[in-house]
Image: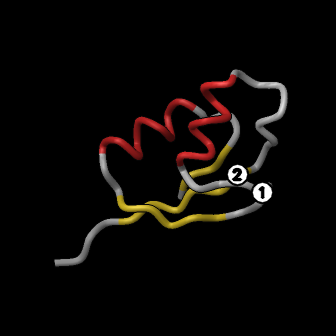
Amino acid sequence: MEKKTIKVTLVKSPIGCKKAHRQTVLGLGLKKIRQTRELEDTPAVRGMNTTVYSRERAD
C-alpha cells in the first residue's frame, strides 16, 4: 500500500513572523523561498501546515 504524501512549498519569507512560525517552517524542512518538499501525510504534518498556511502552499 502506498503512503500518501503532501507537497509543501514555501512562498513567503518567514522573516518578520513569530518565532514559533519560523521554527515550524524549519521543522517542515523548508529553508528557501520556492523550495518544495514532499512529506508523508500525517496529522502532525497537517497541523504544522495549518500553523503556517499563509507562508506556504500545499498541493
Q: CA distance from mark 2 to mark 1?
A: 7 Å
Residue 50 numbered tag: none
Q: What amino acid type should be assigned to the residue bearing mark 1?
A: Lys
In front of the other: 24 or 42: 24
**Extreme residue in the top direction:** 18
| Residue 54, percent from left and from top | 67, 34
- Report the quarter where the N terminus lies: bottom left
Q: How many marks?
A: 2
Report whether 46 appears left or right of 42.
right
Q: Nearer the viewer, mark 2 or mark 1?
A: 1
Q: Secondary structure at mark 1?
A: loop
Give the colour scheme shown: secondary structure
User: Picture coordinates of residue 34 (x, y %)?
Assistant: 77, 60
Neighbour tally class for label 2: few under 14, some 14-19, many 20 plus, Cα within 10 Å: many
Using the image, determine if residue 2 lies above or below residue 43. Answer: below
Which structural element holds mark 2? strand
**Residue positioned 31% across, 50% down in the render:** 42
Is there a contact, CB below 8 Å, between mark 2 and mark 1? Answer: yes
Tell me where residue 49 appears, x and y as whole percent: 51, 41
Residue at the spot of label 1: 32
In the picture shown, does residue 7 fall above or below 46?
below
Disc 2 residue type?
Leu
Q: Residue furthest left?
A: 1
Residue 47 occupies quadrant: top left
Q: Is residue 23 left or right of residue 32?
A: left
Snapshot quadrant of residue 12? top right
Q: Mark 2 or mark 1: name the one nearer the start of the chain.
A: 2
Badge 2 is on which residue?
A: 10
Residue shown at the point (53%, 58%) measured from the top left = 59
Residue at image position (72%, 54%) is 31
Q: Relative to the observer, which residue lies in front, 11 or 22?
A: 22
